[in-house]
Amino acid sequence: MTTQEQTYADIRHEKNKTIDRHLHSTQQLNAFHDGIMKQVFTISLQVHVNQYGSPPCPYSLFLLGSAGRFEQGTISDQDHGIVFEQDTDEAASYFLGLGKTFSDGLHEAGYPYCEGKVMSSNPVWCRSAKSWAEQIALWIETDTLDTIRSLHMICDARVLCGEKDSVPAFKKQITSAFKQDPHKLKRFFENIQFMKKSVGLFGQIFTEQNGPHAGSLNLKQSAFLPYVNAIRVLAMKEGIEPSSTLTRMKALKRLPIYRSRMEEYEEAFRTLLDFRLRALKNAPDYDSSHYVNIDSLGPVRKRELRHILKMAESLHHYVQRFIVKG
């Protein structure tokens, strides 16, 4: 084992040994994840500098997905990108190599590779500021399922290391396009419009019927993403920059049009964050970390889950009314 691998392995060992101390809240857990990822990046950057020299220009390493929203669970995969100042082949080669070193380091430290390759080791997610502006404009114009999904990802971006200005500029570019053409905002909502029914008329919770998670509910798909996606759409409609769902909710509550309902949705989402920490903290792997076995829950926890699911459905329809009427 090389010195580099040993260092990442040490980080992973320390992470696994100490993570239980940070499970009192989602905020505390995500501060812990941030610290681990910064350690990995510091080592990755040094390894890359030793081999290829110092970065040729200012840059930002940013997080996406649940990491970008400061909403990771105990086990999280990778979602990250890089933006750099110089629009040259040399800079692109340098930062793509740095992105691969960082991504491999995260993998060694216990963060699985993103199956969709949303990582700074992928040239799609590692670009100059000029190229990013062009790419985002193309995603907005192309208006397909995949390109709108990429825009959703960008809206959750948060800088972990480096310059702070580029990522807010991405979000302003998207919100500006929505204001100029409200139809694009409707398409942005349509991308997340399908919502799998998770609770029945009489309160029955619909679980997986087959496969390794039969009898379990996919908490990510049935509860977490409906809140996250709906609030993201409202945030982008109103030009709210922060990535965190709770921060977005607080900002929306300051607007009179949303104030009356947002309080109860925020309370339900906080309940969901706490529920996930309690129910899934001992998940053995990343895939299992999304599923909660219904039979393992007592009556009180089941009632809590039903309320979370019903409020998610209510929020989805609430946001739909705002987007449809424009």
Image (tube, rainbow, N blue to C red):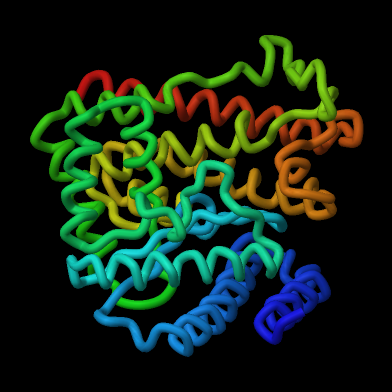
Residue 192 image point, x, y percent: 43, 27
Q: In the picture shown, does residue 194 fall above or below 266?
A: above
Q: In the picture shown, does residue 91 fall above or below 191?
A: below
Q: Quick one: 238 or 290, which is closer to the camera?
A: 290
Query: Which residue is located at x 81 percent, y 38 percent?
Result: 301
The image quadrant that residue 103 belongs to is bottom right
- Using residue 300 as the reference point, say whether residue 47 is left or right of it: left
Residue 29 image point, x, y percent: 65, 66
Residue 145 image point, x, y percent: 36, 26
- Residue placed furthest toward the left: 180
- Using residue 53 as the reference point, say whether residue 272 is left or right of it: right
- Residue placed furthest toward the top: 201
The image quadrant that residue 319 belongs to is top left
Count the marks: 0
Query: Which residue is located at x 74 percent, y 64 percent?
Result: 23
Query: Which residue is located at x 32 percent, y 41 percent?
Result: 151
Query: Which residue is located at x 27 percent, y 37 percent?
Result: 257
- Using residue 70 as the reference point, say whether residue 249 is left or right of it: left
Q: Quadrant of the C terminus?
A: top left
Q: In the picture shown, does residue 281 fall above or below 197?
A: below
The image quadrant that residue 182 belongs to is top left
Q: Quadrant of the N terminus?
A: bottom right
Q: Quick one: 152 or 138, which is closer to the camera?
A: 138
